[in-house]
Amino acid sequence: MSQQLDDQPSFAPPRAVIVRGVAGSFDRALRTDTSRAIDVPLARIQHAAYVRAIESMGIEIVRVPADESCPDCCFIEDTAVVTGVHAVLTNQGADVRRGESAAVRPVLDRWCTVHEMEPAATLDGGDVLRVGGTLFVGITERTNRAGAWRLMQVAASEGLKTILIEVGKGLHLKSSCTLAAPDLVLFTEGAIDRSPFLNAGLRCLAVAEPCGSNVLAIGRTVLVSSQAPATAAVLREQAGTEVRVLDVSEFHKADGALTCLSIRIPVPGMWCT
Ligand code: CIR
């Protein structure tokens, strides 16, 4: 691993993972392609399998009940960014999703000092990729510079660096770029400028499958979408990486994937993504 990352605390599975139920109104979630109907009962089955996969790693699961008035509430990642002992409760870029944060706050209070944002600042958790002591923050239609700045302030109080990335394509930074191992960034070819990651000493691996670049690394286990079999095969070749494939087809239909279904709480003194 590079010099830049050598001094960072260790990458470790989270101490707890917060998830939120799938609302009966999930078939009305925001989405760019409305041609395929969302099957809510199937989404709930897939969500339960996602939760079981994480729970089977010995991680505490904290459940926030679904809110029928918030069709996208299962995408809980967007509501907050946990930097360690602090967390930022976001103003989501999509106005219709702003009601989702209130129920998440009391849960975060258990581990973190929770900070809020000014109304003009917007940020979605899907735009924040943590790697060691650095937060890569995508500037997108959902996250503006004021939102990134607010996060930067809180992150700096924990000694974390923030690097902004202009995201030209896709909904969020993590729609096309996530971490598969502590020093390995997966990304969709052409979607993102990889130089900020290379400059930080990280390895970058391009994947062809659109659903392949959003994976969730829980320690050395990586959750991969079943719609990305070639990505799963490539990751199986990475030394020390265990791949678990999950069907999240109904969440893909609403422009979501694996990271967006949870908020991960790091073990004190360690980091997770
Ligand atoms: C939205 O458009 O906001 C949701 N339908 C999808 C959010 C996905 N979130 C994420 O990847 N972090």
Image (cartoon, rainbow, N blue to C red):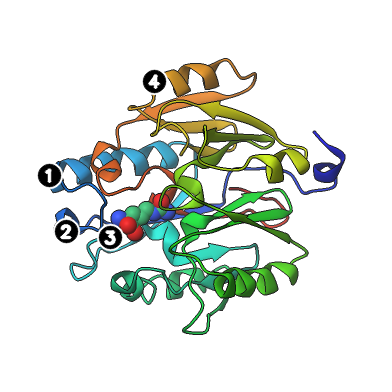
Q: Which of marks 2 and 4 is nearer the N terminus?
A: 2
Give SS at disc 1. Answer: loop
**CA gap, disc 1 and disc 2:** 9 Å
Q: In this image, 202 relative to 51: left or right?
A: right
How far across and down, in percent of the image, does residue 262 sit?
Answer: 42, 53
Residue under the point 28% across and 72% down: 96
Q: Name the residue under label 3.
A: 72
**CA gap, disc 3 and disc 2:** 8 Å
Q: Give the residue type that dot 3 points to.
A: Asp
In the image, 194 versus 1, the foreground residue is: 194
Q: Name the residue under label 1.
A: 37
Q: Give the residue type that dot 4 points to.
A: Pro
Give SS at disc 2. Answer: helix
Q: Name the residue under label 2.
A: 28
In the image, 103 versus 100, the foreground residue is: 100
Residue 165 vertical placement versus 245 (above, below)? below
How far across and down, in percent of the image, does residue 206 sit?
Answer: 55, 28
Find out if the beta carbon at label 3 lies less than 8 Å from the nearest ligand 1 atom.
Answer: yes
**CA gap, disc 2 and disc 4:** 28 Å
In the image, 69 versus 28, the foreground residue is: 28
**CA gap, disc 3 and disc 4:** 26 Å
Q: Contact, CB < 8 Å: mark 2 with mark 4?
A: no
Other-residue count near label 1 (Cα within 10 Å), few / some / many at <14 / 14–19 / ≥20: few
Q: Which of marks 3 and 2 is nearer the N terminus?
A: 2
Other-residue count near label 2 (Cα within 10 Å), few / some / many at <14 / 14–19 / ≥20: some
Q: Give the residue type that dot 1 points to.
A: Ala
Could you tell me if residue 112 is visible in this image? no
Q: Which of marks 1 and 3 is nearer the N terminus?
A: 1
